[in-house]
Amino acid sequence: MLRQILVAGVFHADPHPGNVLLLTDGRLGLLDFGSVGRLDGGVREALQRLLLALDRGDPAGATDALLGVVARPDKVDEELTTLVPVLRRLPRRVDRIASALERGRLGVNVRLFADERDRRHVSALVHQVLLTVLGGVAGIMAVMLLGTPGGPMVTATLSLYALFGYHLLAVAAILALRVLVVIFRTGR
């Protein structure tokens, strides 16, 4: 049958025991050629590739070959056809997970920040939060120092508290501007 289908392209389409005759020399003879199938070269080649892919356990090759055998629709979701083997194994895997849960032997291995991009992103966020907090604290301290009367005088009109307050106010403004620049730059 495989020689008829894959090599000749013409095959007996009704091979049941009533249509097969054992000849005296041990060969098989076919009867009732009322139902005969014909395959063109492209379909025969696709069937050959399908059988080879099945023998090798190659799901991607089998999918490609199968698309050459069947009538192909205008649009084929190949991301979905590659998921078929995974979906077929899914119930068995869910059963294994449920069994492990019942026995209390389920372990999970999580690697946080395994990707360098994740580490950079979190580091940048922490950096921004830290700059924001430092700018806020410097601003609050500046207002408190500028509002505090007295203290040692650096000049006739400027106290040491006011001098520190103005410097902290400048630091707070610089940090706030730095945070705003980064926010607006990444917002694009």
Image (cartoon, helix red, strand yellow):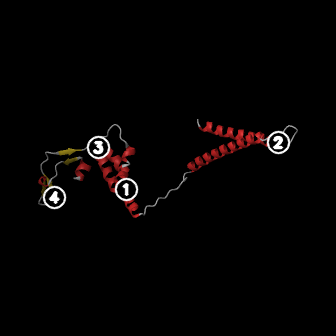
| Along the line of sight, the residue nearer the viewer: 69 or 154 | 154
Residue closest to the far front: 149
Q: Secondary structure at mark 1?
A: helix
Label 4 near label 3: C-beta < 8 Å?
no
Viewer-nearest of labels 1 and 3? 1
- Provide the residue designation for mark 4: 27
Q: Which of labels 4 and 2 is toward the front?
A: 2
Mark 3 is surrounded, within 10 Å at the Cα level, by few (under 14), some (14 to 19) or many (20 or more) other residues, namely few
Q: Say few, some or many: other residues with alpha carbon within 10 Å of mark 1 (under 14 / 14 to 19 / 20 or more).
A: few
x and y, in percent, of residue 40 in the image: 26, 43
Q: Position of residue 179 (x, y in %)?
A: 65, 40
Q: Is there a contact, CB below 8 Å, between mark 1 and mark 3?
A: no
Instruction: Please give the residue where the numbered disc 2 appears in the rendered image.
Output: 150
* Disc 3: which residue: 70
The residue to which callout 1 is attached is 94
The earlier-in-sequence mark between 1 and 4 is 4
Q: Earlier in the sequence, mark 1 or mark 3?
A: 3
- Mark 2 vs mark 3, foreground winner is 2
Badge 2 vs badge 1, beta-carbon distance below 8 Å = no
Residue 146 figure quarter = top right
Q: Are the residues tagged 2 and 3 within 8 Å (C-beta)?
A: no
Secondary structure state at the residue bearing disc 4 = loop
Judge from the rendering whether residue 20 lies leftward or rightward of residue 54; answer left or right: left
In the rendered structure, which disc, 3 or 4, sits on the residue that comes first in sequence?
4
Give x and y (percent) for residue 10.
21, 46
The quadrant holding residue 183 is: top right
The secondary element bearing badge 2 is classed as: loop
Query: Given contact means CB atoms under 8 Å apart, are the residues at marks 1 and 4 in contact?
Result: no
* Viewer-side label of 2, 1: 2
Q: CA distance from mark 1 to mark 4?
A: 51 Å
